[in-house]
Structure formats: C-alpha cells, structure tokens
Image (cartoon, rainbow, N blue to C red):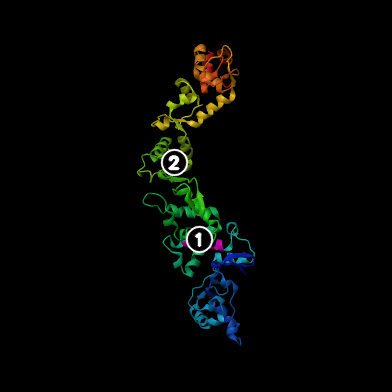
Amino acid sequence: MAMGERRYSLRGCEFSAEFTTGIVTRFCPFCLAEDRDGQAWPNAAMRHRLLWRLSPVRTCRKHNIPLINVRMGKWTDMLHEVQAMNDAVTAGCVSAQKLPSRIPSPLQEYAEGRLEGQAGPAWLDGQGIDQACRAVHILGGLMTYGSAQRAAEMTEDMWDEAGRTGWPVVRDGEDAIREIISTQLLSAIKKNGHPSPRNAFGMLYGWLFASKLSKDPGPIRDIVRDVIVDNVPLVPGQMLLGKQITTPRFASITSIAKAEHLHSKTLTKILELAGVINETEPLKGAPNVVADYAKAKPLIERAKHATPVTRVPDMLSASRPLVAALIELGQLRRIQDHDELKSKVGKAIDGRSIDEVLKFIEGRFEVLDVIPVGHVHLAKAAEKTRVTLLAILELLFGQHLKNVYRLKDHHGFEAVMVSPTEIMKCIEDPPDNASDEIRFWMG
C-alpha cells in the first residue's frame, strides 16, 4: 500500500521505496517455468511473487538459486509484468542452470520473518525494517570489501554477501556494532596521527554523511556518531550526523581556544601544567595538539576566572598576609594546585573563590554603625592574642566565632571586627574538628 512520499506499507511494516527493487523485475526462472509447464496459456499462467519486490530477498528458497534481475528499459518495467518478459524468462532458465546453489541469507530470513510477524534481534526490531536491512548491508559491505569499495559499484551478489557478513555482528546488537566500527576507525590514521572517519568508513561514511540524506538511517547513526566523538578530535559546536557536539571528547588546542575565547598559548600552558597534554609529544603546534575536552573544560573555566594574586588584597580589602592565610586555608583557590607553578596563570587565584569569600563575609555577620567595645580588626586580634591569622580565619569560616560584626560602609575584611577574648576562649576549648594549627595554640 502506498503511504505517500515514496513510502509503502506491507503487513504492518512501513518502509521507503529503496527497500523495493524499484523498476527492476526480480524473479526465479525455475518458479516461472513451473508456472508455465502444462498450461494451455503458459504466459498467462506466470505470476510474479510479492517477496521478489523486496530488496533483501535475493535467493529463491524453493530452488536455492540467486534470483535474476531484469530491466527491459521500457515504461512498463514498473508494472513487473513477467508476461512481457517471456524471452528474458526463457533465457533466465538457461542461465540459471549455471548459477551456484545457495540458501537464503540470514538477513533475507529475517526480513521475510518480520513481515510474517516473527520477532528478531532486539536492536533490529527497534527500527524500521528498511533501516535494519540497510544497516546490515552497509556495515557488511564495509567489512567484506573494505573502505575503498563504493556502494554504487556493488552487484547484487556482492550485496548478498555483505548481508551475510554483516548479520552476525548486527544480530548481536549495539556493543558488537560499536566494536567493529571502532576497530575500523582506529585502523585508519591520518598523517597527523588522528583517526579519519572518511578514510575508515567508506560506503558507511558515504551513506551517513551524504549531503542529501533525506531518510532517517536509524540508530546506527547514533552509534557511528558516538564512536567518532570518542576517538576523533572535533571542533566544539560542530554538527556531526545531525547533532551539535557542544563539548567533544577530543579537540585540538586551536579549536578549544577559539570556542572558549582564550589564546592558544595560554590554553596550552594551562593544560600542560595540569598534565592534560604532554609537552614532550612530537606533534608540535596548537592545530595538531589534541586534548581531552572533558578534562580541559573545568580547567578552562578556572582559567577564565583567573585573578592575579597582586589584585586580591584590593578586591578583599585585606593585607597580603591575610590573603596568604586564606590560600593556605583553602578559602582562596589557585588556578593550578601544583608543587611547581610555572606560569602567571598557575599562580593566579580562581575569581569564583574570591566571590565566595566576599559572599560569606557579607552574608553572615551583622552590620553595625558602631562596633562594640573590645572588637578589633583581624590583624589586631592576631597581635593581641598572639594567635596566627590562619587559626583565627579557621575559627571565623568554621563559624565558631559567634560575636563577629561588620562595620557599616566598609568593604571586605576591612569591615570585619572580632573579639580577641572570644578567640582565646575558642583556643582554650577548641571545637572537635579543630586543626593542628588551633590545637598548637591551645598548648
């Protein structure tokens, strides 16, 4: 039954016109000869079989021979009237004597069985019958004849063999398909050392990457896309098989830097410090150096918020010793936490941690016009108590100091006022989770 837009339906299965033989008439000459034998009107007795119209049906299951394809080059070809092909049928009976014997392929068995309502492998049954058979044919063609073989140059016997080769893999489902496609991809390495889908996939590439691909190829497209994303450097934001890859797994330093609005040299240094890329690799130059984007992304985000250490005191209204104590305490985070910080970026402070510190100060403590007697700035409190700024800050951020205030119209730590008396009480009776720094002052 025609469904419109070159789609048809048969026994509950809908498929595209390409699932049929089109204007080619396919038949078994022995079946037609049997139709004619002993008939008063031999030509009128011949009947074309419905299953012969289907592309994956290439073998006569009764006579175990390849079906013959005929195209007369006339407008009546579309009617598949075998009565109009009497000479071709007769010639086919002669040539069929020389055809090798073969049984129907597992793919043909599957297609015929599905039309009869039989259940097949889950991965195949989860898509259209035409999508399923096409996936088996194309993958099998790639496996059988290699990436140099063009689909347009395949004969019917070659397609039959491709279906037989691809069936065991596709029958086993997504994992088996993914393994074959991954192996095929990794076997084709370009001069720059990266896998090449175009060189690896051959007719599979030609099918899925066709600019005029008007029909949904089914779930094999998702598998191929995932394999490419897992193994091939991509450009962030590029379209790949109908889907935008916002954050590819691998990308060149150049493409990552462009997408993240960073200079490639800055990004290279960041990733080298973090060990994401190896500066000793032989492929030099940002276009050829590839990084794991998933590992690079958080580092990039930190780099975007990089704030020079020299600016932090002004941003927090704090002294340099106080900033150093905040870094040691972990309240301020460096962009790179390595034993040897080799770059200005590596020594910079993550601006988001600065915002977190300011948010803590401005949101936790009561603002007063006049600070109570006995309260002093943090530096003065350290001087009076002879306790380090590090220990006082630990008590402050651990919220063990309850009587802390902020001086109105002052910013950052310049506004914070604490009680030396309260600090000493905490030192004398430290909280359970107190650090060694506090316990040291406890004596």
| Vertical position of residue 403 compared to residue 259: above or below | above
In the picture as drawn, the residue positioned furthest to the bottom comes out as 40
Between 218 and 240, the residue placed more toward the observer is 240
| Residue at (41% x, 56% y) in the render | 199
Residue type at the position of mark 1: Leu
| Vertical position of residue 5 compared to residue 339: above or below | below
Q: Position of residue 101 (x, y in %)?
A: 51, 73
Q: Position of residue 420 (x, y in %)?
A: 55, 13
Q: Which residues are magenta?
A: 130-141
Most frequent secondary structure within the magenta stretch:
helix
Q: Position of residue 337 (x, y in %)?
A: 45, 30
In front: mark 1 or mark 2?
2
Q: What's the distance in space between the residues labelled 1 and 2, CA to CA?
A: 34 Å
Can I make out residue 436 in this image? no
Residue 261 numbered tag: 2
Q: Quadrant of the N terminus?
A: bottom right
Name the residue carrying label 1.
Answer: 213
Left or right of 186, for residue 11: right
Between 139 and 24, the residue placed more toward the observer is 24
Q: Position of residue 370 (x, y in %)?
A: 58, 15
Residue 364 numbered tag: none
